[in-house]
Image: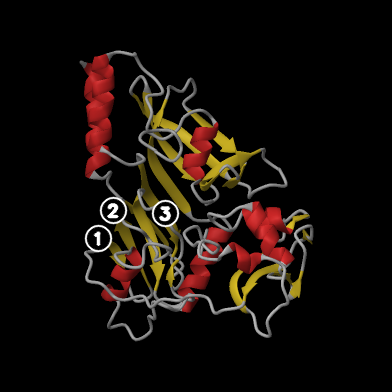
Amino acid sequence: MVEDNDTEYFDDIPDDELMPQALPGELYEHRRVVADSGQNPVRVDRFLMDHLRDTSRNRIQKAAQAGYIQANGIPVRSNYKVKAGDTITLMLDRPRREWDIVPEDIPLHITYEDDILLVVDKPAGMVVHPGCGNYSGTLVNAIAWHLRDDSRYDPGNPEVGLVHRIDKDTSGLLVIAKTPEAKTHLCKQFFHHTTHRTYNALVWGPFAQDQGTIRGNIARDPKDRLRMTVYPDGSDTGKPAVTHWNVLERYGPVTLLECRLETGRTHQIRAHMRHIGHPLFADTRYGGDQILRGEPTATYKAFIRNCMQLCPRQALHARTLGFIHPATGRQLNFQSPMPDDMAALTDKWRKRITQ
């Protein structure tokens, strides 16, 4: 799957279990990360900071000190330098907690479906995949119900299912594979950046240019593990990310953009836009829920409050999705209309500037 960004691994591990001790007779794999071919040498604790959610470098170092971090099957210390092709695993003395994905009769908006794949239009507010704190009511639970009579589809099998993800409060298009062959083919397209994906984003601030490109590596923010941050393009930290944008409409203090992803990193558009000083409107995690542009008047503040009540989430919508069909070789292109909350939001801004 592209960009595994919803799983937490250290949350329920007590500190004393990460302290140095004699290793037990059997360890269980909890997390595996394979360094890609472009990986520059980097300390394993820094490497894992980019791949594990909601943890600290100190806790990773304790895990390494306790012998729970392995490189290519051998325990390593936190100063081990990860190289291209290395397999880094987090091993613990108890099996990883697993849970069954229970089919749930949750409405799905299906844009396209055939024998080997389907495309769904996810509403804002729906978690994509079960994870810590979200074990039901997810898109995966809904898909399991929809495909409950398909003997080929096992919702617990990682070789089928979601090919990529979008955030809980982002709406829009996702593709799901019903067979391992379809998933492998689609994942290769995402890996090689041959898919076509565009997003509508309402962001703070005006733009002097009509279009542009943002390049900058993305990694977890060491000060806030739920947020991503941007490092210079070509940095040893993070993964390369490229976002192309063009202006659709200008509303004065905010701008409606189309963003085209060349890569698909966690929170890519949200982090890139904040990095260039244009956070997404109403994006709590990245500061877009503050009044960042406009007049400091009571009337304007009331207007912004009303806008955020209309769309109380980051104003981001995965509008288009295009890829090659794994079986037919035909190019498929899909488009999702702007959801009601974002449509109402942009309409309110449009009326404001035309009055």
* Residue 217 falls left or right of residue 100: right
The Cα–Cα distance between marks 3 and 1, rounded to whole angstroms, is 16 Å
Residue at image location 24% in from the left, 23% down from the top: 303
Report which residue position mark 2 lands on.
123
- How many tags in the picture? 3
- Mark 2: secondary structure: loop
Q: Residues within 10 Å of mark 1 (few under 14, many from 20)?
A: few
Give the numbered dot on residue 109. 1
Disc 2 or 3, which lies upstream in sequence?
Answer: 2
Q: Nearer the viewer, residue 349 or 13?
A: 13
- 232 up-or-down from 156: above or below: above
The Cα–Cα distance between marks 1 and 2, rounded to whole angstroms, is 9 Å
- Mark 3: secondary structure: loop
Q: Position of residue 354 (x, y in %)?
A: 23, 17
Label 2 amino acid?
Pro
Q: Position of residue 137 (x, y in %)?
A: 29, 65
Q: Look at discs 3 and 1 and give the one toward the viewer.
A: 3
Disc 1 or 2, which lies upstream in sequence?
Answer: 1
Query: Split into 4 quadrants, where in the image is the C terminus?
Result: top left
Report which residue position mark 3 lands on.
166
Q: Are marks 3 and 1 in contact (CB under 8 Å)?
A: no
Label 1 amino acid?
His
Q: Look at discs 1 and 2 and give the one toward the viewer.
A: 2
Q: Are marks 1 and 2 in contact (CB under 8 Å)?
A: yes
Residue at image location 34% in from the left, 86% down from the top: 151
Disc 3 or 1, which lies upstream in sequence?
Answer: 1
Question: Is residue 35 visible in this depiction of the protein?
Answer: no
- 311 up-or-down from 238: above or below: above
Q: Position of residue 55 (x, y in %)?
A: 57, 55
Q: Nearer the viewer, residue 54 or 152?
A: 54
- Mark 1: secondary structure: loop
Residue at image location 71% in from the left, 68% down from the top: 66
